[in-house]
Amino acid sequence: MKKLAIVALALLVLVGCGKKDNGGGNSSINKDSEFTVTVWYHPFVGPEAKDELMNVFNGMTKEFNEAYPKAKVEFEEIPWAGRETKITTSLSGGSGPDIFYLIPDQLSQFADNELIAPIDDILPKTDLKDFSSTSLESVTYKDKLYGLPILRETQTLFYNVDILEKIGGDKENLPKTWAEFNELGKKAVDAGFYARTYDGANTLNSSLYPLIWQAGGDIVNDKDEISINNEKSVKAFELINNWYKDGFISPDSITLEDSSELFLEGKVLAAWNAGGLVPMMKENNVNYVIGSPLKEEAEVTFGVTGAFVVANTSKSKEGAAAFLETMTNPENMRAFNKVTGYIPARTSALDIYDNDADMKKLADLVQIAKPGVIHSKARIFMPDLTANMQAMLEGKVTPQEAADKSAEIIKKHIGQ
């Protein structure tokens, strides 16, 4: 399944009550200003919901025009594939959008290259109290706020209840630790199933990194301190290697980008995935229950925070930032996340899932969700780390050697 991602920014007086504020008091632009704001966004929804999403965007524009009637807002969809190259090339050439979407491990790279503008420099009085603290941390880099988040996504384990019952498991007492899961997973393997999904060719944010964090380890921080090969982090390499050798994960896991189909076909006990799997399970009549992310030393998961940012090349940074505020006010955030199925980044907007037990449970996980590796080279060294993990599963290197090689790869990319 394609990993979804998205984001936006917050309105003038960002209060948790859901009251509208069209802007005009926190920006240096006035209501008679004439400017154009171009927003690049991605296919956050499938073809069947594109009109609904455009209605949300049109609503944002209409609201903004109540405060700035001479402003023009243009939305342009660009594909997920090759998005970083497309955006970087256009901005480096002095063109491109005023506003575009980033996730945290991309944001730091764009910030270091001075391609995006700090929001707190443009709108120093923006009220952020209604945003969840972890969502703001995700878009803060070197003490500067570079975006206003609009959505969250969390990952955890989804269990096939029919398989669970066949192997003597209890949906009311699901595994909480690595040891408990491995005990249950062995029963699944003995019964002819895989224990869980593992996408070896997909982003490490949803494969290796969560397990490193659960073991109490880390990858590299913004001070260039590397810990991917310390004693705790190596436990994650060993766990994945053992899963592969013991048949817990599919032999194709080395090159799989999306193994959700195996789970939907009833071949896997548990799928590591996000909220986007829920409608697919319902469509395929999967009897499921949502579990916890597990822990070795800490209960941690990966969770995307999506934010729209302001390009440094924008001819109207103030106008762009003011529109970002409108995009992410409580009402617009509710509307956007209802259509896209993401988790709102505002606490007040979480009420859209008050009657949805599944999404409410996933929303609760935002408090333990890490946004990825916050380092300007994170997206650059990830492909080499992925290839290194694949070499380990192919038996070419041991888990410790793979971890040490990963540390060397990171050192090379960050210039140590």
Image (cartoon, helix red, strand yellow):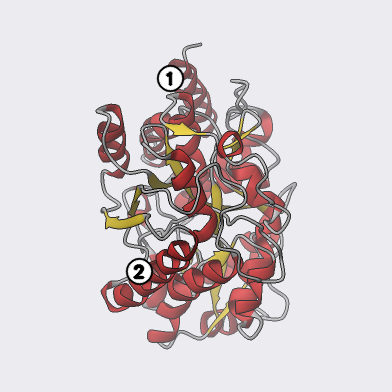
Q: Residue at x 44, y 52 (%)?
A: 32
The residue tagged with tag 2: helix, strand or loop? loop
**Rendering coords of residue 156 (x, y %):** 58, 63
Whether 260 is drawn above or below 279: the answer is above
Amino acid type of the residue that numbered disc 2 sits on in the rendered structure? Val
Per the rendering, the mark at residue 308 is: none
Q: Which residue is mark 1?
A: 413
Residue 99 visible from this viewpoint:
yes
Q: Nearer the viewer, residue 40 or 212?
A: 40
Q: Nearer the viewer, residue 224 or 92?
A: 92
Q: Which residue is mark 2?
A: 45
Q: Nearer the viewer, mark 2 or mark 1?
A: 2
**Rendering coords of residue 225 (x, y %):** 63, 21
Q: Nearer the viewer, residue 258 or 17?
A: 17
Q: Residue at x 54, y 54 (%)?
A: 325
Specify the farthest residue to the top. 416
Query: Is residue 394 rendered to the left or right of residue 170?
Result: left
Q: Residue at x 68, y 35 (%)?
A: 232
User: Mark 2 and mark 1: span between their CA atoms?
Assistant: 34 Å
Amino acid type of the residue that numbered disc 1 sits on in the rendered structure? His
**Rendering coords of residue 373 (x, y %):** 55, 37
Query: Is residue 193 rendered to the left or right of residue 136?
Result: left
